[in-house]
Amino acid sequence: WRLFIGDDGQLNPKIVDGEGTDEFKRTLHKTIKKVTDDFEHLRFNTAISQLMIFINEGYKTEVLPRKAMENFVQLLSPLAPHLAEELWSRLGYTESVTYVPWPEFDEAWTVEAEVEIVVQVNGKIVERAKIAKDMDQEAMQQHSLSLPNVKQALEGKSIRKIIAVPGKLVNIVAG
């Protein structure tokens, strides 16, 4: 409620026409996908959890795209119909939210572009790094060797072997 309606009872001024950040857009499409899938498999608790993730992301962002907020209300309506109808009318609609088609997600926005990997030296975690999801083993190794904590952990040691598992970890064996 507080994300939509301010203390004065008016619509939140952060809700505007236009685009939001890419991160918020990614969260929206992931939410639509997850909630749709969860409803189809009767997993209502995880659908609610994903809606909360969306709300928390909404509090962090400076601009809330109106279309995203409308989609959220549509996703909320099967779980909290009275609240959804009230929010829908506050967004300026006169017809019921139940007559609006279910929102659709764009698969391209549900895929993460980056993943977090763990960098280990002799089996001990020394760094976590974000890398491109499609980075190959050689690039992962080079990136890992350039990290400050890794350089510090390798001081005075020679590298015997580097094991890279794409999208997961880099383990440097040094002695």
Image (cartoon, grey):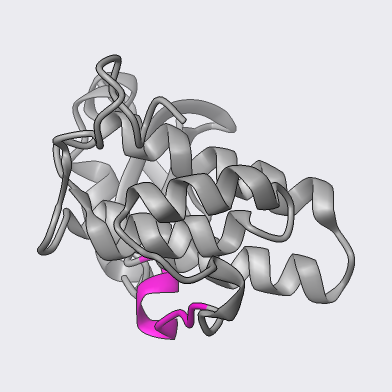
**Residue that sits furthest to the front in the current view:** 94
Above/below status of 96 relative to 9: below
Classify residue 148 as left or right of residue 168. left
* Residue depicted at x 25% and y 17%: 8
The total number of labels drawn is: 0
- Magenta stretch encompasses residue 107: yes
Residue 145 on image: x %, y %: 24, 43
The answer to whether residue 104 is visible is yes
Residue 14 on image: x %, y %: 16, 38
Secondary structure mainly formed by the magenta segment: loop
User: For residue 33, which quarter of the picture?
Assistant: bottom right
* Residue depicted at x 63% and y 65%: 34
Relative depth, front residue between 20 and 133: 20
Above/below status of 74 relative to 125: below
Classify residue 96 as left or right of residue 136. right
Above/below status of 139 relative to 58: below
Relative depth, front residue between 13 and 139: 13
Residue 19 on image: x %, y %: 13, 63
Relative depth, front residue between 6 and 55: 6
* Residue depicted at x 68% and y 52%: 81
Classify residue 102 as left or right of residue 22. right
Residue 96 on image: x %, y %: 54, 68
- Magenta stretch encompasses residue 81: no
Write the start and end of the magenta stretch as one range: 103-112
* Residue depicted at x 57% and y 38%: 52
The answer to whether residue 140 is visible is no
Q: Quadrant of the C terminus?
A: top left
**Residue that sits furthest to the top in the current view:** 7
